[in-house]
Image (cartoon, rainbow, N blue to C red):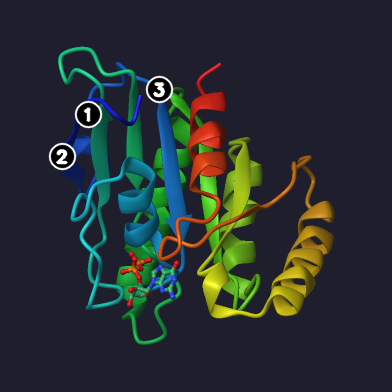
C-alpha cells in the first residue's frame, strides 16, 4: 500500500482540528531528534513527506497523512509531536501532554503507536511518561529502535536487551523490538509489515 498515493492531510494543533475518524490510524511517537521524520520518509519511500526537523521541539501538532485514495484512505499515518526537548518551555510541555493524552484516549480509530527510541540512548525517563500514557489509554504500541547504523552490532544487541527488559515491566504485553536505520534502509520492510499488521 505504500507504493500508491500518500498525501499530507492536515495538522492538528488542537483536538478540534482532528480529521473525521474515517480511516484506521497508526501513530509515530518519540523524543525530538529520534529520527521520526526520516523514518516516516523511509517507510513511505518519499523524501520530504515528513519534514526533518532542524528546530527540535518546535512542532506541537499532530500531522496526518492519507495512505491510498484520499477520498477513501486505507490508512492514516499520524506524526506525533516530538517530546523531551530539554529547553522546551513548561507551558509547551503541558500543552503537549493535553494534546497527546486527549488524542490517545479519545481516538477509536487509532490502532497502534510505534514508539521510536534512539539506539544510542535507549529508553529515557520521558519515554516512560509516554508509555504510561499509552498503557493508561490502552493503546497498543511497539518499540522501534532508530539509527541502528550509528552503533556497533554489539551495542545494538545490548540496547535491544535492555529495552526488552524495560518493556517487559510494563503492564501490557509487547512483541519484539524493531531495529531500523533510515539511512541504510534496515528494518524498513519489517516496519511496513508492523504498520499493515495493525490494520487487522
Ligand atoms: P525527528 O526530529 O525525530 O523527526 O528526527 P529527524 O528525522 O529529523 O532526524 C534527526 C537527525 O538524525 C537528522 O540529522 C537525521 O539525518 C539523523 N538521522 C535520522 N535517522 C537516521 C538514521 O537512521 N541513521 C543516521 N545515521 N542518522 C539518522
Q: Residues within 10 Å of mark 2 (few under 14, many from 20)?
A: some
Up/down of 98 relative to 59, above or below:
above
Residue 114 point in image, percent of width and height? 52, 47
For image coordinates 70% across by 74% down, the residue present is 153
Badge 1 is on which residue? 19
Residue 93 point in image, percent of width and height? 38, 69
Residue 198 seen in render: no
Residue 63 seen in render: yes
Secondary structure beneath dot 3 equals loop
Badge 3 is on which residue? 24
Residue 142 point in image, percent of width and height? 62, 45
Residue 111 point in image, percent of width and height? 51, 28
Up/down of 25 relative to 30, above or below:
above
> Which of 52 and 21 lies nearest the eye of the viewer?
52
Q: Are marks 2 and 3 in contact (CB under 8 Å)?
A: no
Q: Quadrant of the C terminus?
A: top right
> Which of 150 and 56 lies nearest the eye of the viewer?
150
Task: Point out the tag, 1 or 2, that comes first from the N-terminus.
Answer: 2
- Res 10 label: 2
View quadrant of ligand 1:
bottom left
Q: Confirm or reject: label 2 Cβ below 8 Å from ligand 1.
A: no
> Which of 23 and 118 lies nearest the eye of the viewer?
118
For image coordinates 57% across by 41% down, the residue present is 190
Q: Are marks 1 and 2 in contact (CB under 8 Å)?
A: yes
Secondary structure beneath dot 1 equals loop
For image coordinates 30% across by 73% down, the residue present is 57
For image coordinates 40% across by 22% down, the residue present is 24
- Picture quarter containing residue 67? top left
Amino acid at each position: 500500500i505504500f507504493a500508491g498515493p500518500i498525501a499530507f492531510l492536515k495538522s492538528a494543533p488542537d483536538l478540534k482540528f482532528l480529521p473525521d475518524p474515517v480511516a484506521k490510524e497508526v501513530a509515530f511517537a518519540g523524543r525530538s531528534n529520534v529520527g521520526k521524520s526520516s523514518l516516516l520518509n523511509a517507510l513511505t519511500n518519499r523524501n520530504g513527506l515528513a519534514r526533518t526537523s532542524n528546530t527540535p521541539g518546535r512542532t506541537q501538532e499532530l500531522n496526518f497523512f492519507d495512505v491510498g485514495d484520499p477520498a477513501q484512505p486505507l490508512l492514516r499515518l499520524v506524526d506525533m509531536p516530538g517530546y523531551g526537548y530539554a529547553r522546551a518551555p513548561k507551558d509547551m510541555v503541558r500543552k503537549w501532554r493535553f494534546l497527546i493524552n486527549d488524542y490517545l484516549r479519545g481516538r477509536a480509530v487509532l490502532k497502534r503507536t510505534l514508539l521510536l527510541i534512539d539506539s544510542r540512548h535507549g529508553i529515557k525517563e520521558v519515554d516512560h511518561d509516554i508509555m504510561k500514557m499509552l498503557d493508561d489509554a490502552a493503546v497498543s504500541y511497539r518499540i522501534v529502535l532508530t539509527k541502528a547504523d550509528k552503533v556497533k552490532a554489539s551495542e545494538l544487541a545490548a540496547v535491544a536487551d535492555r529495552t526488552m527488559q524495560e518493556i517487559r515491566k510494563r503492564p501490557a504485553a509487547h512483541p519484539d523490538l524493531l531495529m531500523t536505520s533510515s539511512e541504510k534502509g534496515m528494518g524498513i520492510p519489517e516496519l511496513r509489515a508492523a504498520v499493515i499488521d495493525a490494520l487487522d
